[in-house]
Image: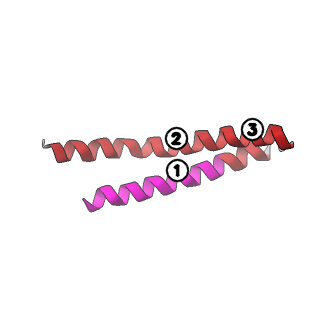
Amino acid sequence: MGKQDQDKRGDAMMLGIYVATGLGLGYVIGLWLGNEFGWKTWGPLGGALVGLAGGMYLMIKEGLRINKQ
């Protein structure tokens, strides 16, 4: 197994971390906004959905880059 194969495998393992990080950060920011502005239910839900969308975007973008190599 060459160095290039190991680099691709490491990049592929990062794909799930992009989604998890986006979801987690979105939820925390939404929770803060919910407490700040009184959006108890919709703040965390909206933040989590925006974070999930951002994480999925980064995952797809990185997956296409890895596949192109």
Coordinates of residue 53 in the picture (x, y in percent): 57, 54
Q: Quadrant of residue 60?
A: bottom left
Q: CA distance from mark 2 to mark 3?
A: 18 Å
Q: Quadrant of residue 66?
A: bottom left
Crowd around label 2: few <14 · some 14–19 · many ≥20 (10 Å): some
* Residue 48 visible in rendering: yes
Q: Is residue 65 one of those drawn in magenta? A: yes
Name the residue tied to disc 1: 55
Please state if 12 lies on the left or on the right of 26 as rendered.
left
Farthest left residue?
1
Residue at 34% in and 46% down:
12
Which numbered disc covers residue 32? 3
Residue at 37% in and 55% down:
63
Name the residue tied to disc 2: 20
State which tag comes first along the sequence, 2 or 1.
Answer: 2
What range of the chain is rendered magenta? 48-69
